[in-house]
Amino acid sequence: MKRVCLSLAAALALALAGCAGPAESGAATPAPPTEAPASTAAPAPTEAPAPTAAPVPAGIGIAYDDGSLPEGGYDEYADAPTGYEVRLVLTADAPVADFCFLALALAGSDDAGGMTFTAEPLYTADTLAPGRPLVVSMTFAGIVPDRGISYTDTDGSTKYFSIEMSGEDGSPLLVPFAPAAA
């Protein structure tokens, strides 16, 4: 039994000695290559262009009229009466030019569900400005929008939105669209 234990101890010692690797056996291990040190010199200063103030896009809000607007404190447009009209309040957080309330006709759609419309102005104003909302009486006629707005934004681009009703809570929404090519 002593011989077996001694034999096992010797075999274990030999096995452990073989696992030590070349560094422990006295053989030199080459050092890994090193990268050249990065330059610590500061980059040459360049003159930055003078900042230009980009126009901030205007935000147009839409909500149901809750009757809290002061008399005479808004502009108003009444679409054709149907007996099912709702009153919507359109507000701007920055003045926008060439504001239009539009009649929309579906011109086409794409595979992703995006719709294009032809648009005819029903109401126009030179500006829609903060503090002077537009109240519109209109009817949501179905699932395809038939009313919308357009305006010239502060950056000079013309924006188009259809007026739709949320399928979640019935709130009015402004959904961007691209007008059909003329």
Image: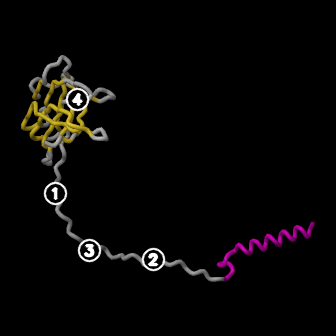
Residue corresponding to mark 3: 44
| Label 2 residue SS | loop
Q: Which mark is residue 63?
A: 4
Image coordinates of residue 147 in percent, x first then y, are: 18, 30
Cα gap from disc 3 to disc 1, whole angstroms: 24 Å
Residue corresponding to mark 2: 35
Q: Residue at x 67, y 82 (%)?
A: 26
Question: Is residue 102 depicted above or below 16 in this figure?
Answer: above
Cα gap from disc 3 to disc 4, whole angstroms: 55 Å
The mark that comes first in sequence, 4 or 1, is 1
The C terminus lies in quadrant: top left
The mark that comes first in sequence, 3 or 4, is 3
The reply to whether dot 3 and dot 1 touch (C-beta < 8 Å) is no
Cα gap from disc 4 to disc 1, whole angstroms: 34 Å
Q: Is residue 19 magenta?
A: yes
Cα gap from disc 4 to disc 2, whole angstroms: 63 Å
128 to the left or right of 144 = left
Kindly give the residue lying farthest to the top in the view shown: 83
| Label 1 residue SS | loop
Q: Residue at x 16, y 35 (%)?
A: 149
Question: Residue 121 is drawn in which quadrant?
Answer: top left
- Residue type pointed to by label 2: Glu
| Label 4 residue SS | strand
Q: Which mark is residue 52?
A: 1
Q: Which residues are magenta?
A: 1-26
- Residue type pointed to by label 3: Ala
Q: Main secondary structure of the magenta part?
A: helix
User: Which is in the foreground here, disc 4 or disc 1?
Assistant: 4
